[in-house]
Image: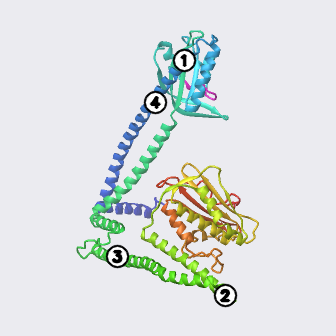
C-alpha cells in the first residue's frame, strides 16, 4: 500500500487533484450536468417534501372526517338501541354489557375497536376498571387528555390521534390511529357512559409509504434522465436523436415510407443514410412477405373452391361404384370401398381448407346464442359413440345438474368439442381400462369443457405444437376418425373468435387433457378457468 506521507504519495495526490480540476475547468458538459443535477436534486427534495406533507394532511383530514362521521352514526345507533330497550329492563349492568357487545361486534366487522366506560364521574378514568372493550385491546390506547376533555365538556364528540396497543395471539402490536369519544345515557340508571372508538390508520400509513417510495423512485429516475438529457443537449445531439426516434416509431407503427432527413457528411449523416437503407430493405421484404401471404391465402381459397366441382363428379361416380360393389370381385369391391372412404376424407379436407381460408381472410363471423355446454357435451358424446365403440373406448360426461350457459356460436362450439373428443378417441389406448371423461363446469365469468384421455399423452413441448396445422405427434399413427390434420387448428381459431382459451396438457404414458374456456358474455375478459388444466388425478412433481 502506498504511504501518502512518502514523497511519492505527496506528489501523486496533487497530480490527481490537478487532473480533476483541469477536467472541471475545460469540460462545460461536466459543469452543466453537475450543476443541473444538484439544482434538480434541491428542487425535487423541496417539492417532494411539500407533496408528502400535503398528501399526509389530506389523507389524515379525509380519514378524520370519515371516522368522526362513522363514530357519530354508531353513537346514534347506540342511543336508538338504548331507547328501544328502555321498557325491557332496569338492569344497568346488563344494558351496559349488551350495548358493549353489539358495538364490539360491529367494530370487529368494520375495522375499529370500542371502549365503553362509566358511569362518567368527574376524575374517573378507564384505568379505574369497569370498562367493556374489544378483546385484545389495551385500554391505555385512549389518551388521558381525551378523558379529561369529557370531565369539562360532555356535550360534543371529541377526537385525537393516538397509538393503538393491542395483543393478538400473544403478539403485542402498536399502530397509529384516531380515537373518537362521545357519551350516551343508559335508561336503567340514568347515568352517562363514555364511548371511545379507536380507528387504525393502516391504510393511510401504507398509502403514504407507497407515495414516498414512488416519489423516491421518480426522483431518482428524474435525476438520471436530467443528467442524461443535459449531457446530450450540450453535445447538440438531441435533435438528430429525436428525429431518429420519431422515424423509428413511425416505422414500427407501419408507416414504412418514413425516412430520416440526411444533411452533411459527418457520422450522424452516415448513420442516417444507413438507417434509411435498412428501412428500405425492411419495407421491401415486408411487402414481399405480405404479398406471398395474400397469394397463399388466395391459392388455398381458389383451389378449395375449384376442387368442389370435380369432386362432386367423382363423388357421383364413386357412389355408383360403391352401390354396385356387391357385383364386383373382392378386389374391385374393396377398391370401391376405399374410394368411398377417401372421398369422404377429401370432402372433409376441402371443407376444412375453406374454413381455414375464411379465418385467414378475416371473414369468419359468429352467430351468437345462449349455449348450454352441458347439452353440447352430451350431444357430441352421443354422436361419437359409434366411433368410440369401434375403438373399444368408453366416453362419459361429468357435468353439473344445472345448465352451464355461455353466449357463443353453437355450431362452432360443437365443432370444437367434437374435434377434442374424436382426437381423444384417436389417441386413447385401445381396450384401455380408463374411459375418456368430458368435464363441464362454469362460474359467474366463464364456462369450460375439458376432455381427458388416458392415452399416449404428449411429450414436453408438444402441448404448444398440437394446434399447428397438419402437425402430428406420431406421423406413423393411423387416424381412426379419418381426420385431416386441421381439426385442432380450426378449433383454436373458433376459440379465438369467441375470445376464449383452448389449452392442452399432456404427459407421456399418462394421457392428455384439452380445456376449452369461454367467457359468459362475448367481449368478456377471461382471467381464470372453472376447470384446472392439469387433471386432478395427476400428482405434479415437487421441485
Q: Secondary structure at mark 1?
A: strand
In this image, 314 relative to 541: left or right?
left
In this image, 312 relative to 322: left or right?
left
Tell me if residue 406 comes above or below residue 12 in the rendering. Answer: above
Q: How dense is the environment of label 2, judged by Cα within 10 Å: few (below 14), some, or many (20 and up)?
A: few
Tell whether position 141 is magenta: yes
Quarter where residue 62 is shown: top left
The residue pinned by badge 1 equals 194
The residue pinned by badge 3 equals 283
Sequence-wise, the earlier of marks 1 and 3 is 1
Q: Nearer the viewer, mark 1 or mark 3?
A: 3
Sequence-wise, the earlier of marks 3 and 4 is 4
Instruction: Give me the residue at 65% from left, 16% from top.
Output: 94
Say whether marks 1 and 3 touch (CB < 8 Å). no
Tell whether position 239 is magenta: no
Between residues 249 and 513, which one lies in front from this camera angle? 513
Estimate the spatial distance between the alpha carbons at disc 1 and disc 4, rounded to whole Å: 20 Å
The residue pinned by badge 2 equals 327
The residue pinned by badge 4 equals 66
Magenta residue span:
134-142
Residue 310 seen: yes
Instruction: Give me the residue at 66% from left, 72% from top.
Output: 426
Say whether marks 1 and 4 touch (CB < 8 Å). no
Amino acid at each position: 500500500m502506498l504511504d501518502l506521507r512518502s514523497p511519492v504519495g505527496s506528489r501523486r495526490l496533487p497530480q490527481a487533484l490537478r487532473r480533476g480540476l483541469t477536467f472541471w475547468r475545460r469540460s462545460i458538459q461536466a459543469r452543466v450536468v453537475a450543476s443541473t443535477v444538484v439544482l434538480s436534486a434541491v428542487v425535487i427534495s423541496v417539492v417532494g417534501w411539500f407533496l408528502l406533507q400535503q398528501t399526509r394532511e389530506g389523507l389524515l383530514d379525509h380519514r378524520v372526517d370519515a371516522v368522526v362521521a362513522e363514530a357519530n352514526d354508531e353513537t346514534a345507533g347506540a342511543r336508538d338501541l338504548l331507547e328501544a330497550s328502555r321498557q325491557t329492563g332496569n338492569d344497568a349492568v346488563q344494558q351496559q354489557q349488551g350495548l358493549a357487545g353489539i358495538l364490539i361486534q360491529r367494530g370487529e366487522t368494520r375495522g375499529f375497536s370500542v371502549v365503553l366506560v362509566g358511569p362518567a364521574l368527574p376524575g374517573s378514568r378507564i384505568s379505574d376498571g369497569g370498562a367493556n372493550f374489544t378483546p385484545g385491546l389495551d385500554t391505555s390506547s385512549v389518551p388521558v387528555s381525551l378523558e379529561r376533555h369529557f370531565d369539562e365538556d360532555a356535550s360534543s364528540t371529541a377526537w385525537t390521534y393516538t397509538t393503538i396497543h393491542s395483543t393478538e395471539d400473544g403478539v403485542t402490536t402498536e399502530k397509529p390511529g384516531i380515537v373518537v369519544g362521545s357519551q350516551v345515557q343508559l335508561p336503567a340508571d340514568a347515568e352517562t357512559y363514555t364511548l371511545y372508538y379507536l380507528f387504525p390508520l393502516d391504510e393511510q400509513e401504507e398509502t403514504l409509504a407507497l407515495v414516498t417510495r414512488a416519489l423516491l423512485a421518480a426522483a431518482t429516475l428524474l435525476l438520471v434522465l436530467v443528467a442524461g438529457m443535459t449531457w446530450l443537449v450540450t453535445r447538440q445531439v438531441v435533435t438528430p436523436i429525436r428525429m431518429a426516434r420519431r422515424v423509428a416509431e413511425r416505422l414500427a407503427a407501419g408507416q414504412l415510407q418514413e425516412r430520416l432527413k440526411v444533411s452533411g457528411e459527418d457520422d450522424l449523416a452516415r448513420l442516417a443514410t444507413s438507417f434509411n437503407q435498412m428501412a428500405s430493405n425492411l419495407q421491401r421484404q415486408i411487402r414481399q412477405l405480405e404479398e406471398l401471404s395474400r397469394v397463399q391465402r388466395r391459392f388455398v381459397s381458389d383451389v378449395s373452391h375449384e376442387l368442389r366441382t370435380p369432386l362432386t363428379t367423382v363423388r357421383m361416380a364413386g357412389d355408383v361404384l360403391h352401390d354396385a360393389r356387391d357385383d364386383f370381385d373382392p378386389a374391385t369391391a374393396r377398391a370401391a370401398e376405399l374410394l368411398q372412404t377417401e372421398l369422404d376424407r377429401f370432402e372433409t379436407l376441402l371443407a376444412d381448407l375453406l374454413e381455414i381460408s375464411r379465418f385467414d381472410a378475416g371473414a369468419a363471423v359468429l352467430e351468437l346464442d345462449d349455449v348450454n355446454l352441458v347439452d353440447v357435451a352430451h350431444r357430441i358424446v352421443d354422436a361419437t359413440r359409434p366411433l368410440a365403440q369401434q375403438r373399444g373406448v368408453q366416453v362419459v360426461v361429468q357435468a353439473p345438474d344445472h345448465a352451464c350457459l355461455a353466449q357463443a356460436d353453437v355450431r362452432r362450439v360443437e365443432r370444437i368439442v367434437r374435434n377434442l373428443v374424436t382426437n381423444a378417441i384417436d389417441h386413447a389406448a385401445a381396450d384401455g381400462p380408463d374411459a375418456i371423461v368430458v368435464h363441464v363446469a362454469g362460474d359467474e365469468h366463464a364456462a369450460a369443457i375439458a376432455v381427458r384421455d388416458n392415452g399416449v399423452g404428449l411429450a414436453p413441448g408438444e402441448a404448444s405444437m398440437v394446434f399447428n396445422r397438419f402437425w402430428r405427434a406420431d406421423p406413423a399413427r393411423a387416424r381412426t376418425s379419418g381426420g385431416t390434420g386441421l381439426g385442432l387448428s380450426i378449433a383454436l381459431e373458433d376459440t379465438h373468435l369467441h375470445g376464449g382459451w383452448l389449452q392442452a396438457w399432456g404427459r407421456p404414458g399418462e394421457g392428455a387433457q384439452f380445456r376449452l374456456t369461454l367467457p359468459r358474455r362475448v367481449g368478456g375478459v377471461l382471467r381464470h378457468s372453472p376447470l384446472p388444466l392439469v387433471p386432478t388425478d395427476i400428482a405434479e412433481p415437487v421441485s
